[in-house]
Amino acid sequence: MFIDSHCHLPHGKYTKTTEQLIQDALSAGVTNIIAIGTSVKENESAIKTADSFGGVYCSVGIHVDEDRDKTTESLRQVLLEQLKYTKKIVAIGECGIDISEGENSRPIQDQINLFEMQIQLAIENNLSVIIHNRNGDDTVVRLLKQYVPQGLRAIAHSFSQSWEYAQQLLSLGAYLSFSGMITYKGRKNIAEIIQKMPLDRMLIETDAPYLPPEGFRGQPNEPKNVVAVAQKIAEVRVDTLEHIALQTYENTKTIFAVH
Ligand SMILES: [Zn+2]
């Protein structure tokens, strides 16, 4: 049994129905899926998916590039409402920092405010935070240092930074989640982290429909492909696929407090 700890379901990029994607995942041994919210609208559909299918959980959150016409306070009110919709919400996010050249996202201070609001909301509701981080390493560490003592539990989603940075996050109690990116030829640096880090802090994800693993590129990624991520980790750690599956399954249940 495998858990895909992070995918976008439903999403316009898929060519299969949600039902088919979940069925195909089940056939591949992927028994649990966490559907991630990124905007007011996507949160609604993630909640609906979780409520409609056994084994599917969801998160609610505002991605740094989404709902830019709304204030942080009004988004907080919406999230508070959405948290009441279902008991299958297991995290806040994805949220975080995205500093990409040429892209038109929120000014940095607005990004930090939005991120911090969601961290506080997670702590108040005893939920984990799923972190999206592109060129925001220092801010993420600063906020973790501030909020971990107050009860923040964090997951660094689709981790691809250095071993040095991984160590910083691990020392702050964070879990690191790996996607199909670890199978890409240009991303060999991630193997060092997978080898060295404690297995009990590792999660696996697809980030479907994005980041299809090697062998599946050129088509929308799917939750079933989380098996290929686990396979790569087993290979790098010289471990069995069964052990990686079981341990990441347990880790996901622990960090998201899923029973
Ligand atoms: Zn994502």
Image: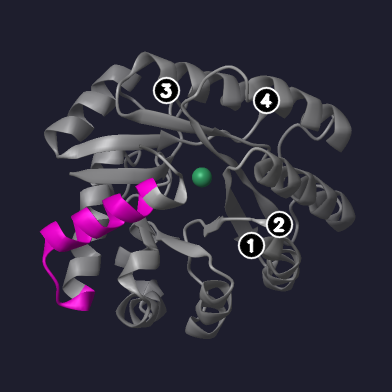
Residue 50, disc: 3
Q: Position of residue 94 (x, y in %)?
A: 59, 44
Residue 134, disc: 1
- Using the rendered image of the protein, determine whether residue 145 is visible from the camera's viewpoint: yes
Amino acid of disc 3 = Ala
State whether residue 32 is above or below residue 152. above
User: Relative to the observer, which residue lies in front, 185 or 48?
Assistant: 48
Q: Identify the residue at horizontal 12%, vertical 32% (top origin).
A: 27
Q: Identify the residue at horizontal 64%, vertical 36% (top origin).
A: 61
- Please tell me which of labels 2 and 3 falls first in the chain: 3
Please check the rendered image and state whether residue 198 is part of the magenta-colored stretch, yes or no: no
Amino acid of disc 2 = Ile
Ligand 1 within 8 Å of the CB at mark 1: no
- Please tell me which of labels 4 and 3 falls first in the chain: 4
Viewer-side label of 2, 3: 3
User: Relative to the observer, which residue lies in front, 203 or 160?
Assistant: 203
Residue 97, disc: 2
State whether residue 6 is above or below residue 228. above
Q: Position of residue 224 (x, y in %)?
A: 24, 40
Instruction: Give the magenta part as a residue range.
Output: 236-253
* Alpha carbons under labels 4 and 1: distance apart: 22 Å
